[in-house]
Amino acid sequence: MALYNRQKTKESWLVKLPTALFDLVIQFGTLSFLIFGTTMVRDENMPLYLKEGTFLLLAISYVFSVAVAGISVNERERSAVGTVSSAVLLSIFCWMFFNGSIALVYEVKLQGKLLALQLGITATLTALWHLIVRQIMAIIRKRGKNNYLVILVGTGKNMASLYRYMTVKKAEKGYKVLGFFTERPDDSIPEGAS
């Protein structure tokens, strides 16, 4: 049995805010590239994409997407696949909300290739960015920062296994084992942990 300190740590917005801001840079950069750097936007749609409210709609769509899907780059037990799928889902929601709202507000006739390219670029770049943040967090945690304090209760193979998991195998997850509670006072470290 293990007891975890489940209080919210400082990591949540200290990691999520810069991640979200760069996500927005990716969204704005992709839209700018598609509007100004390609000839994919139809001539009749161009004045509508150039309205000042277009990028505001994109920002609102992103914020709404975060409210629905969340940002999960610093969850300790989330795998790399989970991080990528979460980033892709966030991109899909933003893409749907933005293109749906721009079609309704400005009556833009949506273009298939443009939509596919927008989703492909934003989903790929957002997933890569979230993986980079995940790796940065792993490095920070390996260096002893941003740790959850853990007290282990019990002895035996399972406890030794849990101890190894938290201190050796998954050091990047950021668990700091403070100590053990055991019925046998001579057991300071679980059997087989070292």
Image (cartoon, grey):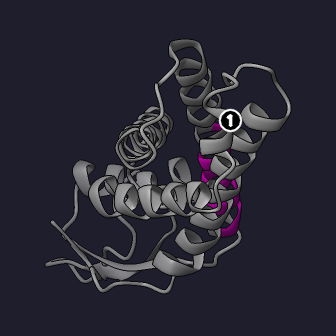
The reply to whether residue 138 is visible in this rendering is no
Say above or below: 45 vs 172.
above
Location of residue 138 (image quadrant): bottom right
User: Which residues are drawn in magenta?
Assistant: 128-140
In the rendered view, does 14 fall on the left or right side of 25?
A: left
- Name the residue nearer the viewer: 108 or 10: 108
Say above or below: 37 vs 79.
above
Q: Residue lying furthest top in this view?
A: 113
Q: Secondary structure at mark 1?
A: helix
In the rendered view, does 131 fall on the left or right side of 183?
A: right
Q: Residue at x 73, y 31 (%)?
A: 34
- Name the residue nearer the viewer: 168 or 141: 141
Q: Residue at x 29, y 82 (%)?
A: 5
Q: Residue at x 51, y 37 (%)?
A: 80
- Name the residue nearer the viewer: 109 or 10: 109
Q: Residue at x 80, y 20 (%)?
A: 39
Image quadrant occupied by the N terminus? bottom left
Predominant SS of the magenta segment: helix
Q: Amino acid at mark 1?
A: Met
Q: Residue lying furthest front in this view?
A: 44
Residue 132 part of the magenta-drawn span: yes
- Name the residue nearer the viewer: 69 or 156: 69
Where is residue 123 shown, x and y percent of the image? 55, 33
Count of number-bearing discs: 1
The reply to whether residue 8 is visible in this rendering is yes
Which residue is identified by label 1?
46
Q: Residue lying furthest right in this view?
A: 37
In the rendered view, does 84 fall on the left or right side of 3?
A: right
Where is residue 13 shown, x and y percent of the image? 50, 79
Residue 89 part of the magenta-drawn span: no
